[in-house]
Image: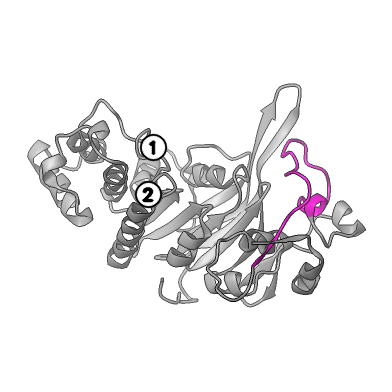
Amino acid sequence: MNKTENTNVQPLVEAKSLKKHFQIKKAGTLHAVDGVSFKIMPGETLALVGESGCGKSTVGNLVMRLLDPTDGELLFNGKNIYDAKGAESLELCKKMQMIFQDPFSSLNPRKTVAKILAEPYEIHKMGNAEEIRKKVEALCDRVEFSKSLLDHYPHELDGGMRQVVGIARALSLKPELIVCDEPVSALDVSIQARIINLLMDLQKEDNIAYLFVSHDLSVVRHISKRVMIMYLGQIVEVAETEEIFRNTLHPYSIALLSAVPKVETEHSISRIVLKGDVPSPINPKPGCRFAPRCWMAEEKCFKEAPELKEVCPGHCVACHFANMSREKMKTAATVKM
């Protein structure tokens, strides 16, 4: 777990009302990300969670400039990254790196591991062939990757080793921020633990900040300092990790956490069952996007979109009735697990 942040430290990353809309022929506008704001402090792990299709990976791609925003700003050390060009843009690439979900498709199958790890150094002209080889070998030592495998191709490695190569590549330029897009979801549980522990050790050594995109709440609880919960393109709740798990306030967050498997020996567990399907992100209707599935929705919820407001120090919720959600959850449809 990360150390308590100094309130005088300026954010490393600050997103301001980020939006990404896609025009769909004969259908309308798909609101993949719709007004997302957040901050990441130096050395902090901020987790972004939500169900598939809610826009998590799109946020990660916006942070990495793999997509251009429809609107909004993203500040890195106080400067808007979308204004960066030329040498400034290249320098930003050194400070912001990404670990992808699929370690196989994110590595060039035609290149050996040695060439994959050497490429960032070559692009940024950080030494001759001999110097770069030494840097690559030092990188292998950091992530505990056997140098005997450097001349192997990605298909010759198992999933865990491929992801270690992805992590090593992300570390090569000594970044200040790494976007981790579901970095362990494609791996076996035993390998997941090794990768998570490696990420945490590297963070302690280099004070790296992570935007950790995941749907696995048990992993999120282990690695993150704060958690953002996303639903249909919008952030619905943000708080310290333990606060989220102890005192969730948004109805969607409550339902999401109720689905986390738990080991109980004496008491049965009630899982909240949401009614209906997830609404389409194409031309979303006014009001709260969770209202059609919410057990405590009232007329106001269908007409007026709630703002993300701080309800207690460090805990923000986008719900008109957040102060009543824990009590009203008793009326939600549940099933015994």
Determine the residue positioned at 74% across, 72% down. Answer: 326
User: Does the magenta segment cover residue 104?
Assistant: no
Q: Determine the main secondary structure of the stretch shown in magenta.
A: loop
In the picture as drawn, the residue positioned furthest to the right comes out as: 299
Outermost residue toward the top in this view: 26
Residue 311 quadrant: bottom right
Q: Residue at point 18% right, 49% down?
A: 140
Distance between mark 1 and mark 2 Cα atoms = 41 Å
Q: Is residue 307 visible?
A: no
Identify the amino acid type marked 2.
Asp
Q: Is mark 2 on a helix, strand or loop?
A: loop
Residue 188 badge:
2
Q: Give the range drawn in magenta.
A: 269-293
Q: What element carries label 1?
A: helix
Decide if residue 294 is on the left or right side of residue 193.
right
Residue 137 image position (x, y, % from top left): 13, 47
Q: Name the residue under label 1.
A: 86
